[in-house]
Structures are given as structure tokens and as C-alpha cells.
Image: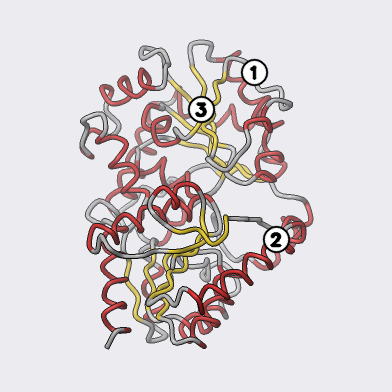
Amino acid sequence: MIIAGESSGELYGAYLAKAIRRISPEARIAGVGGDRMAAAGVELMSRISSSFGLVEAIRTYRELKKTFNKTVAALSTFKPQVLVLIDYPDFNLRLAAEARKRSVKVLYYVSPQVWAWRKGRINTISRLVDKMAVILPFEEGIYRETGLSCEFVGHPAMDEIGDVIGSEGFAASDIGSAELKTRFKARLGLDPKKPLITVMPGSRRHEISKLLPVLSSTIAGINEKYPDYQCVIPLAPNIDGSLFKSASIPPSCRLLRDSAIEALAASDAAIIASGTSTLQAALLQTPMVVVYKLSPLTFFIGKLIVNVKYIGLVNLLLENSVSDDSGLRMAELLQDSASAENIVAELTKIIDSRAYREDMAFQLVSVRKLYSDKRASARVAEMVHELCNVSSL
């Protein structure tokens, strides 16, 4: 049974289901997810229902409670050998406790951000979970200190990137090349000869609504300063495109569906809402500026309880896992700092300063090296089968 609570985790669940079936084609897999997991052969007990932040979570409590009750019931009726929990800690740790009562083996894939806040969860996880599969290198040591079996498996974004660039006949060594960028611009129906900026406003409706007014003004500013640049916004699979119709997005910026990797692979720069997309951009060697806005109350509370120097995954990796970096970090523009003026100014540095762009490229290569020899989905599928063998003894 695979449980994913939001868009990125649902993609990882789909890749994992495929990898499990490559080892055991007869495997039966149930779970909570979305269309991609269903397409991978997962029997959906309920669909994803994600939220983020204090104010936003209150609005979806009833839906989450209904999904939780369905999933707990399925632990008894489906009787899985292994329960795979993908991130989504408030939901999944409660479910792990229910699995433990039923002697179901638990594999936690994609760790909660215990290094940033609520560090007490480390002990809860070590008590409820049989194995951890983590996607950030520095997380491995955190769990091993508790005695919990833990392995850095890489990141499933590498699987997605490999599939996308491989579909056009490219290899990992081609990432960042002019030929690859040209091919993917043409694939997206863009002018292959013009530079491209990708804008990624997030995968949650509330974060998109917070950022869209600023991003609309930013795109207008880019159009004025760099009229030759093209612009695209890839929409997350779970986001209704109607959300953008009232946002006054300049008509020069195209909306794309399910094309985030293609867009980033083709791009010369990107504006990205903090999240997994910053790592995707790093793995595709795309220079970026990181932006984010929350409701004032959520941001205020977050500053009190979250203990991190950076919020972007790429910066966290540079800070904690790369030893020979140049010291440069991707610009992070948060709350009031996430203004059109500031975003355009940072893009101007990326576009106009060769030295700045080359320094950023060096940093992105350093991040990519952390993942270049890892295949997360395949390794986690092996871990699932290892636990299945243990549970059948």
C-alpha cells in the first residue's frame, strides 16, 4: 500500500509502483494518490487532498479525516505486507501507528523535514517505522543516530528527468546543451531560436493565488526589458487552469499542462516557488530565483518554529551536503521581498552577468553530482521487496 498526500509525492508513488512491478509483475498495490498512481496500476482507495500551513489546513480537515478513516479500514481489509508512506507526516505518522498495531511493515519514503522543525518526530518515526528511504544526503545521519535503518536513495526527480530527456534521444550528459534546449523548445511549440524563462508558481492552489499577482507583474516587466524572451507557466497536474484566467497573466506567457521538466530543460532561467521544483531546476542545470508567499499568520508562526537558513532545496543541499562549492546561493525572495521589481532585478543578474551565471552553473553541477549515480525508485522497490520477504517469514 502506497500513501501520497500531494502532487509531488503522488508522482513518486507512481514511479515506485512501476518499479515494484518490474520486480514482481503480479504485485497488487493499493493506495491514496491521483491519476498518475492509478495509471501505474495502483488501486486508489481515496484521492490526494493536500494543504499547507495553519490557516489552509483548517479548511480541509473534514476531507482529510474521511480519507484517513478509509485508509485505516483498508489496512484491515487489504492487509498489505508493506505500507509505503511518502512524506505528508501529519497524516502518515498517524497511519504508521495504525499499521504498527496490525503488524504491517512500514517504509517511510521522503522524510518529513525534521531537520527544520518538530525534531521530536525523529523519535516517533524511529518507533513506528521499519526503514527510512531519504532523498536528501544529510538526512541519513539524522536517523542512523536513533538506530533506525536508513538509506539515502537519491531523488525520484532523476527518474522523471531521465524519462523526459530520453524520449528525445538525449542522455544525462546532454543536459544544459544548446541542442537539448532547442529540441525541447520546439517540442513545446516555442521558437527554438529565442531564449526562454519558465515560471513555476507552485502546486498548491493557495500558494499559487498568493504569487500570481506578483508573477503577472514580473512577466510584464520581463516582456518590457527583454522583449525577445519567451515565457511559459507549466501547470501542476492537480491545478485547474481557470485559476489563471482572472490573474491578468500577460498573453505573451503560455500555460502548459504536464510539461514542467520539458520547460525547465529548455529554459535559460526560471522563477520558482520554493519546493521540489528548485531541485528539478538544479538537476537540469537551469539558473533560478526562488520566490514564496504565505498568509501573514502562517509566515509569522513559521518564523517562530522553523529553524533553517534557507527554504529552497537547492540551497539546503549546497549548505549541508556540498563541500567544495563557491559559496553562492540561489536568491530567495520571500513575502514582501517577492516583488516584481526584485524578481526582475535578480533575473537581470542571471541574464546579463556572465560571471554570475557561470558561478551559478558551477553550484548547480555540484548539486547534480549528489544524485548522478542514484536511482531512487528502483532502490525503494528493492527495499519494499526486502520487507515483504521479512514479513512473510
Sequence-wise, the earlier of marks 1 and 3 is 1
Front residue of 98 and 296: 98
* Side (left or right) of 256 relative to 243: left
Disc 2 designates what residue?
63
CA distance separating discs 1 and 2: 35 Å
Disc 3 designates what residue?
256
In this view, the mark in front (1 or 2): 2
Sequence-wise, the earlier of marks 3 and 2 is 2
Front residue of 272 and 5: 5
Residue at screen point 43% across, 16% down: 190
CA distance separating discs 3 and 2: 29 Å
Quadrant placement of the N terminus: bottom left
Sequence-wise, the earlier of marks 1 and 2 is 2
Instruction: Say what amino acid the circle numbered 3 marks.
Output: Leu
The reply to whether discs 1 and 3 touch (Cβ–Cβ < 8 Å) is no
Front residue of 117 and 336: 117
Q: Position of residue 309 (x, y in %)?
A: 55, 59
Is disc 1 placed on a helix, strand or loop? loop
Instruction: Say what amino acid the circle numbered 1 marks.
Output: Pro
Residue at screen point 33% across, 24% down: 181
* Side (left or right) of 204 relative to 258: right
Is disc 2 placed on a helix, strand or loop? helix
Q: Quadrant of residue 105?
A: bottom left
Q: Quadrant of residue 17?
A: bottom left
In this view, the mark in front (1 or 3): 3
Circle 3 Cα neighbour tier, 10 Å, few/some/many (<14 / 14–19 / ≥20)? some
Q: Position of residue 340 (x, y in %)?
A: 66, 29
Disc 1 designates what residue?
250
Front residue of 112 and 39: 39
